[in-house]
Image: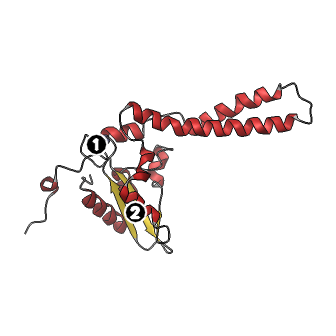
Amino acid sequence: MQPMSDAARFPAATCWFCGRAPGSAASVALPFLSLPDHQDIRVVVLPRCDACRAVHVRKQTHPYVIVLGCVFPLMLGAMFLPVSEDVLPWAGAAAMLTGFVLGLVVVAQRDIRVAKRHGIKPESDMVGHPLYQQWGRDTANWRLQTGPREARKHRTHARWTSVSDHRVAFANDATAMAALEQGCREANVPST
Ligand SMILES: [Zn+2]
């Protein structure tokens, strides 16, 4: 009997982030390595469509820029506070800390806001996916690797990357590639 072709398995599973379009090679790939020696690899794939990926990895101001943009004005303001010179360094430190926290909140809220505008789940919502929960919780045996370095180079703050990104990163690693293909089959999304 012929192995089932991709065409026969489709339609692909529906995108988990919008619930509208079919999942594609833009699906999220989460490689888990076995502990303690990283001998085994397992790739959990969460169905995602091309449009949702485009929203998740869109070009945006780098988080560092936003954090610094919050820190500097506050510190500058602190320098001109009518306080004694003894207190000034503390005021500066407090301003720096406040700016830093404020920056982090702005960065965290931004992705959620953008996703909401497009009527989809933000990428960070994947931690609520049952498969993520199942594998992510088993911290004694499996550890999630963040996105491959090759993919990060191009989208510095896309922490979680797609199946197609991982295909590039795993090009010279047959075991990892097989795990990726397996993940795609289990999720019922195309791997290319
Ligand atoms: Zn989608």
Res 82 quadrant in image: top right
- Identified by mark 1, the residue type is Gly
Which residue is painted at 40% across and 58% down in the image?
132
The vertical placement of 156 against 39, above or below, is: above
SS assignment at label 1: loop
Coordinates of residue 116 in the picture (x, y in percent)? 41, 34
Coordinates of residue 85 in the picture (x, y in percent)? 92, 32
The vertical placement of 161 against 36, above or below, is: above
Which residue ends up furthest to the left in the rendered image?
Answer: 1
Quote the CA–CA distance across marks 1 and 2: 21 Å
Viewer-side residue, 169 vs 23: 23
Label 2, on which residue? 134
Q: Which quadrant holds the N terminus?
A: bottom left
Is the CB–ligand 1 distance for label 1 below 8 Å?
yes
Of the four image quadrants, the one with ligand 1 is top left
SS assignment at label 2: helix
Label 1, on which residue? 19
- Identified by mark 2, the residue type is Gln
Q: Residues within 10 Å of mark 2 (few under 14, many from 20)?
A: few
Give the color scheme: rainbow, by chain, secondary structure or one colour: secondary structure
Can residue 172 be seen from the camera position used here? no
Q: Does 22 sit left or right of 104 as displayed?
A: left
Which residue is painted at 34% across and 67% down in the image?
174
Res 188 quadrant in image: bottom left
